[in-house]
Amino acid sequence: MADVSLHGIAKSYGSAEILRDINLSIDDGEFVVFVGPSGCGKSTLLRTVAGLETVSAGELRIGGRRVNEMPPAERKIAMVFQSYALYPHMSVYKNMAFGLKFAKIGKEEVDRRVRQAADILKLSALLDRKPRELSGGQRQRVAIGRAIVREPSVFLFDEPLSNLDAALRVNTRLEIAKLHRELGATMIYVTHDQVEAMTLASKIVVMNHGRIEQVGAPLDLYHHPSNLFVAGFIGSPRMNFIKGQVHSIGEGSATIAFAGAQTMVEIADGRLKAGDGVTVGVRPEHMADEDPRTIPLTGRIDAVERLGEASYVYMKLDGGDDVIVRSPGDTQAVPGGHYVAHVPPHALHIFDGQGSAVRLR
Ligand code: ADP
Ligand code: MG
């Protein structure tokens, strides 16, 4: 088991800067998820921890030791990839045992570890099968088993569920969470799927263009995104953004005008000035409740998606902004009709002209 820390990590390929000034500490036993859009540098960052990529600048420490110059095999890490990369001609047992051959571990110890991993992953009955005789989910469990038998200090996962169908993804996600509880190992997990990030992580690292946008517990990021990027990335459907302007500033408060309405918010920092352009953020799931305290915003319906338990109403507000409202499953809303979205003042997010969240009280 080990903690991992990254200090000023940068990575370039030629003149292309892929990672910039990454600073992060990961505690022993933590489950950290790197999430962000495709191409933002998640895999590259994971591969630098693994030692499969060298860094252009900065220091990487695992278990308190600098590992920049240490080859992957000595870092006590094990990596699980999206492509399971199993040996097709070997049985499940041999696939799991294979990596230990080179670690000079006795036959009995290898057998103990393989059987224990198979037990944890419910693969005991499948040890003699070849990979082609397994489902996608079982193959991925073998790949995870191959990591477990190495008893690494840190597990690294790169989009391990991407090749599985939706039902299996949910299942395997639960199994990985359980595995983390049972092993108590440090895990770093890369995904572009914010639901995976929210459900698995003790700490989420949101990345964009090779930088860290925000680090926090899942619900922290949901409730207190620090900028427009994180606000739009965490939550589904994504947060609605409405153009607004600071109407006036009071003692610890600001009055914000948006979509033909006005509301006062209590602010905890003094950055805003009257006349400033702002973005008002409000989540689709907070806009359906009629309540005397909410601000009604009227508009016309573009589309309605009925999911059963809820309906997503896509509407254009009279002020011109497009928003999504998560409405009850039995809503009467129909495309072309009028609709009223209800904005609760206490659930607003305000972002300044640079896209940074304004701290609210
Ligand atoms: P992610 O895993 O977030 O989708 P990657 O870490 O794979 O993103 O890639 C980040 C960026 O680095 C991408 O723009 C990709 O094209 C670039 N990149 C990755 N590997 C190389 C390489 N070997 N040479 C040049 N560019 C690379
Ligand atoms: Mg990737």
Image (cartoon, grey):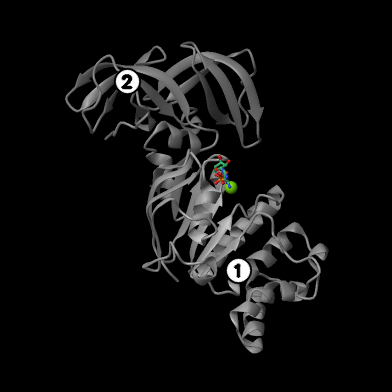
Q: Position of residue 174 (x, y in %)?
A: 60, 58
Which one is nearer the viewer's eye here, 215 or 90?
90
Distance from Cα at disc 1 to Cα at disc 2:
54 Å
Amino acid type, mark 2? Thr
Query: Which residue in the protein does label 2 denote?
Result: 263
Decide which of tag 1 and tag 2 comes sooner along the chain: 1
Q: Is residue 221 above or below residue 294?
A: below
**Is 289 placed left or right of 21 in the picture?**
right
Amino acid type, mark 1? Ala
**Residue at the front extreme, as displayed:** 14
**Is the N terminus in the top left, top right, bottom left or bottom right quadrant?**
bottom left
Local crowd size for mark 2, using a 10 Å CA cut-off: few (<14), some (14–19), many (≥20): some
Between disc 1 and disc 2, the foreground one is 1
Q: Position of residue 231 (x, y in %)?
A: 44, 35
**Residue at figure coordinates x 63%, y 12% from the top left:** 336
Query: Which residue in the protein does label 1 denote?
Result: 147
Secondary structure of residue under mark 1:
helix
Given contact means CB atoms under 8 Å apart, are the residues at marks 1 and 2 in contact? Answer: no
Q: Position of residue 61 (x, y in %)?
A: 39, 63
Which one is nearer the viewer's eye here, 50 or 138?
50
